[in-house]
Amino acid sequence: MAETARRISALEGRAYEGDGISLAHAAPASRLSLRAPQASLQALSGALAIELSQRPRSAAANGARAALWLGPDEWLVIDDGAADLTTICAKADVLHSAVDISHRNTAILVSGPRSEEVLNSGCPQDLSLDRFPVGAASRTVFAKAEIVLWRTRQDAFRIECWRSFSDYVFSLLEKAARENG
């Protein structure tokens, strides 16, 4: 990702700490919307140094990089090290579509023993560990905003959403954390 100016998070300075719940904005990251046929996956996985899973609702992580399965030929690739993911994918020299969405998306980190409860205030998915285990990822909604939800630990989630919806999502999460606490 080529940087011409410092990217300011739409959630700069936003955080919430409450009884059993923590909400924070994630540091800026490189993000890639990746589409590819099965024949291209081995080369792209090698270039990205991460296995592009073909299993629904799964994610794979390697260091600061993760690939979240969103559909049969679609992944969200996140790199907290701010790597130039489009250039990395171009080196694979196979059929694919790699679109840098780093400036479109932002992330909210939700953690603590109440994280499932707070998320379920606006997300219709069953987030219990047996139905949404550590490593699970899916495209879903939170209230009226489309999100990508990734369970990173037993009591921690990463919400990827469009910057334009991030204040809305964060505010509703904070409201749910305060009301139910």
Image (cartoon, grey):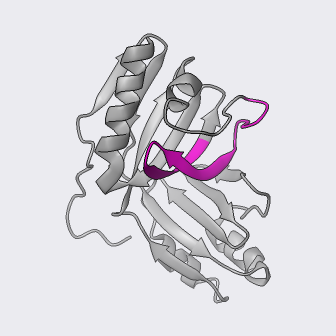
- Left or right for 12, reference 94: left
* Residue at the outermost left position: 5
Q: Is residue 73 above or below residue 62?
A: below
Q: Is residue 152 left or right of residue 177?
A: right
- Asked if the magenta segment contains residue 49, the reply would be no
In the rendered image, the vertical position of residue 24 relative to residue 48, given as above or below: above
Q: Give the percent coordinates (x, y) of residue 72.
A: 73, 69
Q: Which of 112 and 64 is in front in this view?
A: 112
Q: In which quarter of the image is the N terminus?
A: bottom left
Instruction: Report which quarter residue 14 is drawn in.
Output: top left
Residue 22 location (% of width, % of height): 43, 23
161 shown above or below 133: below
Tell me if residue 62 can be seen: no
Marks counted in the figure total: 0
Residue at the spot 38% in from the left edge and 41% down from the top edge: 169
Q: Name the one closer to the observer, 40 or 162.
A: 162
Part of the protein shown in magenta: 129-150
Q: Which residue is drawn at 35% across and 37% down?
A: 170
Residue 56: x percent and y percent? 76, 57
- Quadrant containing the C terminus is top left
Q: Residue at x 49, y 36 (%)?
A: 122
Q: In x, y percent, where is residue 8?
A: 22, 52
Q: Is residue 67 left or right of residue 72?
A: left
Where 181 sits versus 135, above or below? Answer: above
Q: Quadrant of residue 171?
A: top left
Q: Does the magenta stretch include residue 133?
A: yes
Residue at the image point whose x is 43% and y is 52% from the top: 161
Q: Decide if residue 38 is in sight here.
A: yes
